[in-house]
Structures are given as structure tokens and as C-alpha cells.
Image (cartoon, rainbow, N blue to C red):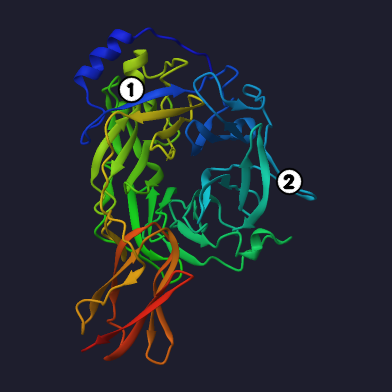
Amino acid sequence: MRLAYSLAALLLTILLSTQTYSQNFNGQWSCTYATADDGANGTGQRTMAVAALGNNKFVALINRSSKDAYYLVGYNNADSVNGRLGKIPYSQSGLKTLWSNIFDQLTLNDARGIARYQDANGPTNIVVVANNDDDHSLLKFELKEDSIYTYPQRLKTGSDPIWAVDVDGNGNVFVTTQGDSSTAPKVMVYGNPDTESGWTSSAHDASGPLQTITLPDVGTARGIAVNKEGTVIYVSNYMTKKIYCYVGDVQNGYTLYSGFNFQMEGTYQSTVDTTATGLFEVGPWGLKFMDGNNILFAAAAANFHRGTGYEYSRIYAINPNTGVIMDTLDVAAWNYAVTGAYNNRTNNIASGYSSTYSVDYDQEKNLYSQSYYGWTVEKWVYSGTLPTIPLTITSVGKINETIPTKFSLSQNYPNPFNPTTVIEFSLPENANITLSVYSITGQLLKTLAKGNYAAGNYKVSFDASKLATGTYIYRISNGISTIAKKMIVLK
């Protein structure tokens, strides 16, 4: 790909004064850098996705079938012309990243999704890749100071091609099958590699997904995002132009939440070609849930569409409870403002050739995206303060930002109740907690919350519609202390 440079500072100033990229927030998004294309800092090929591991620290996933090229590129202390780890030949055929653990070896093949790995201790330097080898494996790699290395854990997912992947704060891995025009995609949830033996066994066979969700429509699942607690899952379907929301937990399963509604119109009129041929399809791609602020970010673009397709790439900031778009980062419009065209680029603050299929964020809440046809990774910074949206649709929700002074469990209310009640608990510090309901004889009936929760005050809704009238026990444990209380179902 040849670079085209444009001195468009005046145009950029004019456009920024007349067009607001942040439609609903109090600031504006700006691209602080885009990695170089065919220079020493480039990814070298079409860039499918990106996983952010820290500020200016990320791993890019390359996917180009015509060149049989599927590989990872690591960056540390990155900017437009610095940060790439290792030598990456430009547009080389047959370049593939090798996952190798002694005699156990596998190369990347049509890998579509990548996500940073995290656990109870927080984000790590490890990424999980959704790879389409014969066994459609989940592969783990680690970014070190000089390069990307095999992390000795992988897991077979089965016979279905896979696409998007994400990880919750307990290390559980969520992956989508691709789906097609006659097959509904699925979400499969696999356990933490430290507890699921298949990740490290010689066979790499899972004991089976902890949960499997089949989407309500046929289509292609391009993105998945899960909150840190693993209680909310979002899945994008490019074919139906929808994003679905599921609530629940890994232990008890997930339910489609009908109150979340996001669906794109699906076609876009070219701003250059206004004839009928200027219409092309667009839809939602990669997703990322920003914990703390509780904002769902969704990349949206055309489906591997060059030419007029460069005119549409956006990252939407979406209300996690309703699906309403709260803000829009218009990548294509930014590229046009900087370069004066949709198919130009500069080495510093615009990729050009916008084809935004992936989005992630670092600990400082900067966004990272990629340009598939621009062969680059972009960093976006927000000038204002990102809002915090209360997440109200989960069975576990934070009440406020006050940090309590002690570990406690409140009496449920109302009590007696039929069929629902609310339980509140307080954590003075981050803790792995389990909150469960038992019969009076000690039989476990339901786990309401399990995992690593930040310090704060929480409330949990409990639906006892399937229980008979009687007295029940609810109990919370943080690994050190246990508190139990009684509640009464009265029908």
C-alpha cells in the first residue's frame, strides 16, 4: 500500500469547528497517533483486531488470506513511528505466528479475534486468540519486553469456526462461533485456565463449555464483550445489524435481556457517489465493555468493503442498559478532515482507508482501534471526562461509590416476600465473594454472586418464584468471614 500525504491542517481546523465527533459527551475524541504503514513501525499486513495491554502497549492481530499471513505484532511505548517489537517484513506471504510448547505446536490460521487476558489480580500481559485451526483453538500468548511468546495454555473448542473472544475478571473465556446465513452463532464460556484442566493437558480437550448460548437469529457474530463480574454479555451480529445483551452468571447461565435494543439501519449512502451504487451495507463489529464507567463501545463498519466502504467507520459509545447510542467517534470523518480524502493517510494522526473492526481501551481509558485496509493501529484520546453509567440490568449492581468500613450483609427487603426481594452487601476492600441461597436443611439452591468484586456497596435481586413458601438461608463469604441471614418466602 502506498502512502499519500496531505497537508490539511486548515481543513481539519474548519471541519472540527463545524462537526462534533462527540455527540453526547462533554468532550471530543482525537487520534493522537496511528502506527506507520510501510515503515519500521508498521504491522506489515491487513490488521484485523487489537488488544490493549496498557498505555501505548498493545498487540495487533494480522489476517490476510490472500497472502496466507496470520500473525501477531507487539508494541510497547508506541507512537506513530516507534514501539514495534521485532522485525516484520512488509506484505510478506506465508508469515504465521507459531504457538509452541516443546513438541506441541500450532500456527495461527484465519485467526479473527483477540482479547487481553485478565484474572482476579487484574489485566495481564497475556492475550487470548480465537484461532481457526482444525480444532478451532483458543491460544494464549504473552507480550514481553522484546517480542511475543507462547504462553503454555491452549484449548480446543470443537468443529465450529470461531471469531470473537473476551475474558471476564475471573479468567473465564467467552468466545463466539462465526455463524452464517443459515446458522445462528453461539457463545461458549470456558473456565479459567487455572481450573479448567483442558488448557494444560496434552489433549487440550475441554470438559465442555461452562455455558453455551445460541443467539436468537442466524447471522455472523463479529464481537463479544463481557463485564468484569461476568454478569453481562454483549454479542454483535453483523448480518442482523443487532447487538444482543444477556444477563446472568457463569454458574447459573444467562438470559436474553429484552430491554436492551441496538440495531443499525444497515445501509449507508456514500458521500461521494450519490447514485444507487453508492449504497453499501454496514453493521456492528468488535465490542468492548469499559468497566468502571460501564460504557459499551462498538466498532461499526462495512463488511470487507473497499472504495466507498472507507467512508464509514465509527465507534459508538452505547448505554449498557438500553442500547441507546450516547456518543459517536466518527473515524472516517476524522480521516477525511486530516487528509482531505477517505483513501489517504498520514504517518501521525490518521490511518486513512478506514475499516474499523475492533476496539479496546487501556487503564487510562484511551481507546485503540485498527484500520484493516490501512494496515495500522490507532489511539484515541478523549478531551472531556467520560461519564459513569449505573449498570442496572444485572442481578448484582453497585449502589454508590462510597467505600464501607466493614464487611457486612443486610437483611433482605421486603421480607417476607413474593416473588422477588433485594439483598445488599458491603465490601471494605476488593474481595472474592460468594453469595448463595440455601434451603433450611443446607441444600444449595442458587448462587447469586460469585467472583472478584471491588470495594463498595452492592445490591442483588433474587427471584424466588420457583420456591415454595418457607424459610431460606442466604449466606455470603469473602474467604475469611461468612455471614448468614434468614428470609421468608410467603405465597
Q: Secondary structure at mark 2?
A: strand
State which quadrant residue 445 falls in: bottom left
- Evaluate whether residue 414 shows in this view: yes
State which quadrant residue 437 falls in: bottom left
Within 10 Å of disc 2 (Cα), the crowding (few <14, some 14-19, many 20+) is some
Q: How far apart, in angstroms, are the residues tagged by discs 2 and 1?
A: 41 Å
Q: Amino acid at mark 1?
A: Trp
* Residue 483 placement (x, y as % from top left): 38, 77
Q: Which numbered circle lies on residue 334?
A: 1
- Evaluate whether residue 238 shows in this view: no
* Residue 390 placement (x, y as % from top left): 25, 53
The single residue placed furthest to the front in the displayed view is 405
Q: Amino acid at mark 2?
A: Ser
Q: Which residue is tagged 2? A: 100
State which quadrant residue 333 falls in: top left
CB within 8 Å, label 2 to label 1: no
Q: Earlier in the sequence, mark 2 or mark 1?
A: 2
The single residue placed furthest to the right in the displayed view is 103
The residue under the point 23% across, 41% down is 326
Within 10 Å of disc 1 (Cα), the crowding (few <14, some 14-19, many 20+) is many
Question: Between 437 and 93, which is closer to the camera in this rendering?
Answer: 437
State whether residue 78 is above or below residue 58: above
The residue under the point 35% across, 37% down is 282
* Residue 142 placement (x, y as % from top left): 62, 43
Question: Relative to residue 226, is residue 112 drawn left or right?
Answer: right
Q: Secondary structure at mark 1?
A: helix
Tell me the quadrant of the picture where the C terminus can be found: bottom left
Q: Which numbered circle lies on residue 199?
A: none
